[in-house]
Amino acid sequence: MATDTTVMGLGQAVALLTASVVAVPLFRKLGLGSVLGYLTVGLALGPFGAGLVSDPVAVLHVAELGVVMFLFIIGLEMRPAKLWALRQDIFGLGLAQVVTCGALLSCVGVFLGGLTWPVAIIGAMGFVLSSTAVIMKMLDERGETATPGGQRAVSILLLEDLAIVPLLALVALFGAFDDGQVGSAQQMWLNVGTAIGAIVAVVVAGRWLLNPMFGLVATLGGREIMLAASLMVVLGSALFMQWGGLSMAMGAFLAGVLLSESSFRNQLEADIEPFRGLLLGLFFLGVGMSLDLALVAREWLIILVGVLAFMITKAIGIFLIALLFRESWREAVLRSVLFAQGGEFAFVLYAAALSHGVFDERAAAIMSAIVILSMALTPLFLLLFERYIPKEKVSFDGVETAADLQNRVLIIGFGRFGQLVSQPLLARGVDVSLIEIDVDMIRAAGNFGFKVYYGDGTRLDVLRASGAATAEAILVCVDKAESADKIVQLVKSEFPVAKLFVRSFDRGHTLRLIEARVDYQIRETFESALVFGKAVLVGLGFSPAEAEDTARDVRKRDDERLALQVVGGFTAGRQLLRGNMTTPEPTPLTPPKTRGTALSPTTAEVMEEKPADGGRAPAAGAAPPDQAR
């Protein structure tokens, strides 16, 4: 039986998921990003590839909900006060970028492409609206969404979302002039008024209706009803905005902002997150499917020149605007790379231009192909940016480098751990040298009366300059286990006389430090966890003496277990852990005829002590929890 490829069936869905599961992790492993992986899969399986799905437009209509849900989650993290603080970036930086790039690209279309002004303007403005899905996905993967640069990118994207309303009105106006319908200007103002009314309606509903509704659902409904209510709010706000002529993503973002201070915020985010990730991936698959390879083959020269001309011109405009707003050179280049492509709103604008007679079918197809190719090239350009653009040099204004330090104690690392460690020493008048690699931390410490020098403790020359050769004690308080291990190795090799005190991160790190024969090590959360546990026992009604005895016993058993692990490996001493599940202790098939002989006093004590009922060992092969993390 022939397969109907106009509607996605179960077979097509399984094939798309399988290809995505294989290709996307591979592309991420290669450093190309998940977006390019999805686009490649869509191109390979779409109507112009294997032909598994012949109607990518239908896929895009469904998958656009992924962008909608993505913007809803961004809105949940963007409280109204925070959004208000970004108003200058939205209506200043964002508007300047849109207007400047639109003007430059329009001139390219007229003078390089020989287009009429209406076609050039609509084509240019469609390309100006960058892809929210691509940019936010790449920022999210880089962990930069919450950074100042990421927040400015979000501000620009919000302005571009708002720009779709006047641009659609402009398309209608161009179409009306071509048809001689001067009265359509009234329709334009009607569309603008409708859009403003839709925004006001969503704000009013979010401000006074959503919280009471979720409270009622949480009280009377079940878990599945709460999930249905979450989806209803996201999709309903998106649909309402679409009725008003705005983008669905803008409606979802507004709903998220209005719920950002709600007590149901975390629940909403947890409900929407799985749908968001899956549908966003489907959106990129749909974009890849939409690339008409036959058209690209026929019009390859026009499309190639169009992609290069539009991306380069737009990147130059973005770069100049970023410098005009006094942003760093590297951030200006990064924003140029991220925003140089067209976006999903271009398809909406070009479809409207086609329906109003501003575009013919050939122009709409070519412009759509240019946008899709630009979206596909962006991850590659970002990869080149990371590889060849050097990172900004850190400013050392007001920061001194460690040189010729001569103090009794050297503390390496002045984060939250090193700051507390220094207090008893300074209280007793001990001369201390402090070095740290984080310039911002050094400046912040200076505001509180600390003289901290810049220095990388993993380098031998820095240790010498910091006085390690004459220090009586060296305290390793860095926040990375690998760095701590390297410092320990250097100190034990080059400065063996100094006493070495090291911050440990977990049990495995502690065993490595004991093997390296440091003078003292402590897991950074061990003592605080014991104090916390004692406070809980007292809060539950146990006497302070009982709580103290229990903590002392836990400490003793931990020391014994650690001694056994040094000899027998990480899994040794499991019987000393108290678990909350009773499991049988393994016994030999044939009981031994003679009792085992202890090789050390510590082992003898362990052999004589039997675990309490609740202290049986975990099942064999189970990974023991690290109670001292």
Image: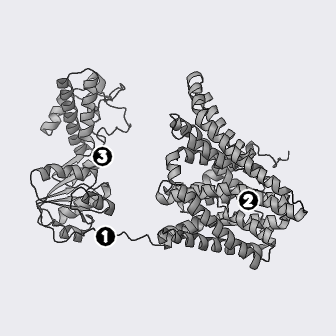
Mark 2, secondary structure of its residue? helix
Mark 1–mark 3 Cα distance, whole angstroms, equals 36 Å
Which residue does the image show at 30% across and 24% down from the upper left?
Answer: 614
Residue type at mark 3 is Asp
Q: Which mark is residue 506?
A: 3
Percent position (x, y) of residue 273? 57, 42
Of 33 and 410, nearer the camera is 410
Residue type at mark 2 is Leu
Of 38 and 316, nearer the camera is 316
Mark 2–mark 1 Cα distance, whole angstroms, equals 47 Å
Q: Is residue 18 above or below residue 231?
A: below
Which mark is first along the chain, 3 or 1? 1
Which mark is first along the chain, 2 or 3? 2
Residue type at mark 1 is Asp
Q: Left or right: where does residue 406 sit relative to residue 268?
A: left
Mark 3, secondary structure of its residue? loop
Of 80 and 319, nearer the camera is 80
On the image, which quarter does residue 302 sit in?
A: bottom right
Looking at the image, is mark 2 or mark 1 nearer the viewer?
2
Q: Which mark is residue 167?
A: 2
Mark 1, secondary structure of its residue? loop
Q: Quadrant of the N terminus?
A: top right
Percent position (x, y) of residue 455? 26, 66
